[in-house]
Image (cartoon, coloured by chain):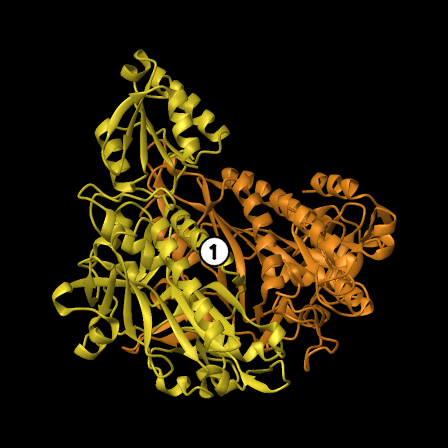
Chain colours: A orange, B yellow
Amino acid sequence: MLQSNLFTKTKKEAPKNEVSKNAILLSRAGFIHKEMAGVYSFLPLGWRVMQKIMQVIREEMNVIGGQELFLTSLQIPELWSKTNRWSVVDNWFTTKLKNGADLGLAFTHEEPLTNLMKEHLSSYRDLPFSAYQFQTKFRNEERAKSGIMRTREFIMKDLYSFSKDEKEHQDFYEKAKNAYIKIFKRLGLEDKTYTTFASGGTFSKYSHEFQTLTSAGEDTIYIDRNKKIAVNKEVYTDKVLSDLGLKKSDLEGEKAVEVGNIFSLGTRFSESFDLNYLDEKGEKQLVVMGSYGIGPGRLMGTIVEVLSDEKGIVWPSEVAPFAVHLLCFGDKSSKSYKEAKNLYRQLQERKIEVLFDDREMRAGEKFADSDLIGIPLRVVVSDKTIAEGKVEVKSRGNGGEKLIEEAELFANLEKHK
Amino acid sequence: MLQSNLFTKTKKEAPKNEVSKNAILLSRAGFIHKEMAGVYSFLPLGWRVMQKIMQVIREEMNVIGGQELFLTSLQIPELWSKTNRWSVVDNWFTTKLKNGADLGLAFTHEEPLTNLMKEHLSSYRDLPFSAYQFQTKFRNEERAKSGIMRTREFIMKDLYSFSKDEKEHQDFYEKAKNAYIKIFKRLGLEDKTYTTFASGGTFSKYSHEFQTLTSAGEDTIYIDRNKKIAVNKEVYTDKVLSDLGLKKSDLEGEKAVEVGNIFSLGTRFSESFDLNYLDEKGEKQLVVMGSYGIGPGRLMGTIVEVLSDEKGIVWPSEVAPFAVHLLCFGDKSSKSYKEAKNLYRQLQERKIEVLFDDREMRAGEKFADSDLIGIPLRVVVSDKTIAEGKVEVKSRGNGGEKLIEEAELFANLEKHK
């Protein structure tokens, strides 16, 4: 894409009232726009990143057999009264039909999915299975000051599993846990993300959270660096530690952000909705469920919090808006522009995603924009590089800079596609 | 995909209270689930179709230079008061923050996009450009009885264009109109879809609607079959007809559904938000805008209304949930199952999307399900076809049935990929 066509502009100043690093950098770089506290639009660069994060998640959900669907935001109170979550949960956004009937905007989807499964599930042969979606959730948060890491409206990937019994559920639960670990690895958050024991609610001893270490996090966790596991403050007791075989002396308290969570739900929902099946003996059994959440927007914010530097954002390659940021200097008649345009075409032919900064602007400004936007590889074409028959490449991540031939550039990029 | 894994089941009976053909067939075939009147969830088969419809639209929007983004549902009244649409429009769903502040759920996005463009647009060099999204819209409809063709919550593709002047706007408007015509062609609706003159509002004489002929439509249009254009009843006057060079005697009244519309907005929104740019002479000018809507869900419903037959749905190949419905009979130890499974693997290796009905069930039921679900090509492996060293293929559209060799099947499918 030509940068002169990209409608967003970078800004030198952070927007007023933004205090979180992720929102400041993403707004300055033109990835997001704040509509109100806790409500952000994704502009083209930001939406490219979001789509890539969602695609990584989608691929890993498909691997474990998840079937994608799309449930609704508008919800009727009747369904949620069955589990007592209509009156008890206090972060509903509510609205009304013209006839005065109350509706809610979904903050999760256990109730409607459990309810609709009654029409499709009857026999043990129908189990196990799992379904997921990327769908906008609404949560009426009291305060929202963490940029895109805690918002009132956000896309969530929520997966729900349905199993015959506890054992079948545990098998799937382990698969889902491993899928999550793969997702964080692909998103460049592996080193800082800990599988964390947290409160399990009524139906299971623990749930698992995935917590990424960052001072911007709202949670406190106690990590065991060697075992690469952690315990959330809410269950950090002597009893739990001994239960998990952890020693207080091996643990360090850290601030972290919850980037995903997985829950065993037992029969809590299937009981409320009488979601059952006939087993091999023809006897009625309740379905055992699990739910597995992850927020692509929060992941995007976390990546910015964890991987950015003083100059701007540093995107991991799997989710970068483009693979290459191509820069040249001089006007449209200059040799460097013509060479760069030629290289731009060749990269496009090779299906390499490239943002070509074709604007007429000072080199310093272009370099600053490039660092702010954070595309993994910067490629510069200048009179100097042309004289040498090469291009200058620089990694946004490690800063390594060198002159290489175009053929080598293509080979490296193909390798990482 | 194995049909035994697909969690949805077909139903013999239509759901109660459904009167529209599209909702009846889509519910029976397991594509959608009704949450309440005018609010439908998309189950895996339905979501596959929706994603394909969206991908067709996305490709055509990218061709004309649209940049994809994602705006928010939650809206503050201040923005919409500037155009007087907060108090005047009566199909808002409204909600409140915990501090009591009113919010609305977006039914369109001219106001927030025009507002945010003030931060990114300053010079004639920034124009023209266009941006689009696939985003859930909310409309508090009084009644909702047309299945997924008129709903209270629906994904809409809305594109917005920003131009320097009326001429530049008209150039883009024509491009967008042609992109729409290509979309309807790719979706198999070309023959029945008419570019229709409709009321233009304050800032232009006419807008264009795209109307597909169907008795399920809520609109009446007057069509000229030869010229392939139409006039909406709302502007069907002698003056308009003479203006458009149409003769009353050439026109026939028909029921139709509006599957898309494109609007010239003039400076209505840029004036309200003071969205301007500096022209070549350094003088302030207002931006000229357009908006272009299309609803993937309504398109899906329209396809079902227009192309289905008494046995079920008939999907056009570009948007079918799968390209091939593979059927075999007999249990897992039978020859036909083993042959079919082998063919299933080969189709998957060739990246052909195939639904394999591996269930143990009577042939009649499998055929009925296959007709109901509507995948374009049915392939049957039976003892008879194996004896001949062939497979039986049948087109869901024209019913043509024949025995061909697997190599020929692969070649045909590759050709249409």
Identify the residue at horizontal 28%, vertical 50% (top origin). B26
Q: Is residue A89 visible?
A: no
Identify the residue at horizontal 68%, vertical 68% (top origin). A26
**Residue annotated with mark 1:** B58
Depicted A261 relative to depicted A107: above or below = above
Identify the residue at horizontal 20%, vertical 73% (top origin). B241
Split into 4 quadrants, where in the image is the C terminus of chain A? Answer: top right
Counting every numbered tag in the picture gives 1
Amino acid residing under circle 1: Arg
Identify the residue at horizontal 28%, vertical 36% (top origin). B370
Depicted B276 relative to depicted B329: above or below = below
Q: Residue furthest top?
A: B387
* x, y percent for residue A158: 51, 54
Q: Residues within 10 Å of mark 1 (few under 14, many from 20)?
A: some
Q: Residue furthest left?
A: B249
Split into 4 quadrants, where in the image is the N terminus of chain A? Answer: bottom right
Image quadrant of residue A278?
top left
Depicted A359 relative to depicted A126: above or below = below
Tell me: B122 left or right of A214. Answer: left
Image quadrant of residue A11?
bottom right
Q: Is residue A338 visible?
A: yes
Q: Nearer the viewer, residue B354 or A408?
A: A408
The secondary element bearing badge 1 is classed as: helix
Q: Nearer the viewer, residue A285 or B331?
A: B331
* x, y percent for residue B257: 25, 62
* x, y percent for residue B359: 34, 30
Chain label for disc 1: B
* x, y percent for residue B104: 44, 78
